[in-house]
Amino acid sequence: MTDALVPLMVLLPLLGAAVALMLGRRLRTQMAVSTLVLAAVAVIAAVLLAQVDASGSGISVAVGAWPPPFGIVLVVDRLSAIMIIISALMLLGVLVYAVGQGIADQHRETPVSIFHPTYLILSAGVFNAFIAGDLFNLYVGFEILLSASYVLLTLGGTGERIRAGVTYIIVSLVSSLFFLSAIALVYGATGTANIAQLSVRLAELPQDVQLILHLLLLIAFGIKAAVFPLSFWLPDSYPTAPAPVTAVFAGLLTKVGVYAIIRTETVLFPESDLSTLFLVIGGLTLAVGILGALTQADIKRLLSFTLVSHIGYMIFGIGLASIVGLAATIYYVIHHITVQTTLFLTTGLIERFGGSTSITRLGGLRRASPMLAVLFFVPAMNLGGIPPFSGFLGKVGLFVAGADAAGGTTSTETLGTSSPGPAWLIWTVVAIGAATSLVTLYALARFWNLAFWRPKSELEGYRSRIIDSVQEAPAGATVVATRTTPVLMLAATAALVALTIALTVFAGPLFELSGRAAENLRDASVYVSIVFPGGVR
């Protein structure tokens, strides 16, 4: 019976988008439709997660009753169910925030007749990517994301947003070209695009052919995930969009790329060993991203650089090639989606209340709005890794997994036939990760102290070495400050802040769930058995 719920996670947002488009003149009804659709998807994801977690396996649905590998297969296991439920909650929270902003601003920033249908289409693309059982359907999910993302990124039609949108679309098209080329080569070499069947057939190819196909897929997914050196586009693209759009992009879209990388390493190429490459890229992503954040005066660009940097933690966890490392990575993905989305929503409140997002123009916000100070402080400290928040717990989990892998602990189970990289390299990345956490904390604390703690009377003529060492955002401008903030915007942000705290309170059960999800990924045959219960035909 629950099998019928799987396609609804994609179908409901698409149908909701069609209904929302037809209701363009009935704004309240359109908002209600969007909210109900995303709430329904969150409930469905919770039901499916409970079932697959209890059964220990997963659910596969052959669309149109075409048996795999001839038709489209949708697959839900613990990992995909986790990703969908956290994504649906984030999308729902941001939607409520956007509704509040739209009502207050009379929909100047997010024209409701365009925003809601496009937002639901974006949601459908995200959900489709998480449950796609074949590479081409995964590509379709990415393309749905791309088309909807461009519309959302350029809402308002300002020159800055159009330029950022053009950069984003070009980079995304290059990623799509790599992905589509990889799919064509994979199909030509194996005769299938079904992920479960590919886990068997790819292993039969010569090693050099496997490596070429493997790297092509990783390049495509690496651009989506914004890993170094493929992350150059992100800091200039995301900050220009309206606050709700930036929050969704920063919180979710890069994680779709990380999810695809996890599937590639655990199902498609479980016999391939690129652990050293992942460790090097993870360390460089951590270092380069956080160094960029240090030089930013604008909080939106600062957060964009920390977004790039913290993707490095996830790549590091994947590179450890162990159950413990992958479990910590899954937990960290959940943490980062929630905290990063929340911080960008809070940044939208700061811009609205203070008229700017630059530390050179902000001051006295703590006294003017104590609630806003708390809403920013809690997720900022979480991202910086202050104990006992989930950011600290996730990093500790990754570092412990790294120490186990470097020390050759016998209890550390590896993924497939992969082996961890050299011990010295693992310890080096652990050290970089610890330093990155401290620098992240410094950069966010610097902004909080200047924007919230510094009296506004000191703004004019204020000089310090801190201010002299940062640079403003290109074409950065102030906006008209609004001392009253809509209740819906505050409520949505406060709810997400509460969710970030819940990740700490329930860290034990979440780590256990992440561990069970990682255990499912230990052997590619588990995924294969979900799609082909009787074995690969």
Image (cartoon, helix red, strand yellow):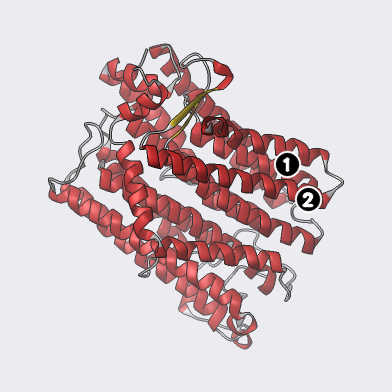
Task: Check disc 2: other Cα within 10 Å, few if <14, some if 14-19, many if 20+.
Answer: some
Image coordinates of residue 369 in percent, x first then y, are 63, 79
- In the image, is residue 171 above or below residue 67? below
The disc at residue 64 is none
- In the image, is residue 143 above or below residue 291? above
Q: Horizontally, is 413 left or right of 375 in the view?
A: left
- Residue at figure coordinates x 69%, y 64% from the top left: 488
- Residue at figure coordinates x 62%, y 52% from the top left: 92
Q: Horizontally, is 260 left or right of 158 in the view?
A: left
- Is residue 249 visible in the rendered image? The answer is yes
Image coordinates of residue 407 in percent, x first then y, are 13, 51
Picture quarter containing residue 430? bottom left
- Residue at figure coordinates x 52%, y 17% from the top left: 71
Q: Earlier in the sequence, mark 1 or mark 2?
A: 2
Task: Check disc 1: other Cα within 10 Å, few if <14, some if 14-19, many if 20+.
Answer: many
Q: Secondary structure at mark 2?
A: loop
Image coordinates of residue 425 in percent, x first then y, are 21, 48
Q: Amino acid at mark 1?
A: Pro
Q: CA distance from mark 1 to mark 2?
A: 11 Å
Picture quarter containing residue 182? top left
Q: Horizontally, is 446 left or right of 278 in the view?
A: right
The disc at residue 111 is 2
Front of the two marks 1 and 2: 1
Quadrant occupied by the C terminus: top left
Q: Which residue is mark 1?
A: 117
Image coordinates of residue 293 in percent, x first then y, are 46, 61
- In the image, is residue 388 above or below residue 416? below
Q: Secondary structure at mark 1?
A: helix
Q: Amino acid at mark 2?
A: Pro
